[in-house]
Amino acid sequence: MPDYPTTKIGFTNDNGQINVRPLGIPGTDHGQSLYQIACSHCGHNYAANGTDIHLRKCPNCQDGRPSTTGWTL
């Protein structure tokens, strides 16, 4: 499986969303896994598919989509 920068721990996208860790849970896109994402602006944590990390916005302070599969801390 290829190693993408967005799925590396610590990756931060242009919206200030930080990849905290892989969750080891299957995602909702074909062949995807979920990752814990934290907002650098408000600290909110949520889950996202690996393929979505680069574009995610915080569901708490940036009107982004809710946590994938409803995952919570």
Image (spheres, rainbow, N blue to C red):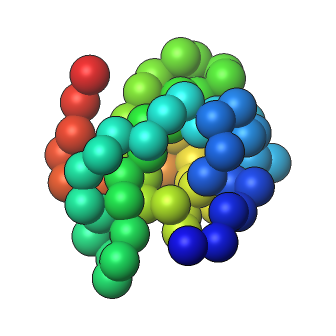
At horizontal 54% and vertical 30% (from top left) the residue drawn is 20
Left or right? Give the position of 27 relative to 39: left
Name the residue at 61% across, 52% down. Answer: 7
Identify the image quadrant of residue 62. top right
Q: Determine whether 50 is above or below 2 in the image.
A: above
Residue for point 25% across, 60% down: 26
Image coords of residue 46 (percent x, y): 38, 36
Q: Which residue sits at x=75%, y=55%?
A: 5
Query: In front here: 64 or 10?
Result: 10
Question: Is 58 on the left-hand or right-hand side of 71?
Answer: right
Q: Residue furthest left?
A: 70
- Which one is nearer the viewer's eye here, 49 or 42? 49
Q: Position of residue 49 (x, y in %)?
A: 42, 60
Q: Is residue 27 above or below residue 70?
A: below
* Placement of the C terminus among the 4 image quadrants: top left
Which residue is more in the foreground, 20 or 63? 20
Q: Tell whether 42 sits left or right of 73.
A: right
Total numbered badges shown on the rendered structure: 0
Query: Is residue 57 toward the left or the right of residue 15 in the image?
Result: left
State the image coordinates of residue 71 (x, y, percent, origin top left): 22, 40
The quarter of the picture where the N terminus appears is bottom right
Q: Tell me where residue 39 sits by quadrant.
A: top right
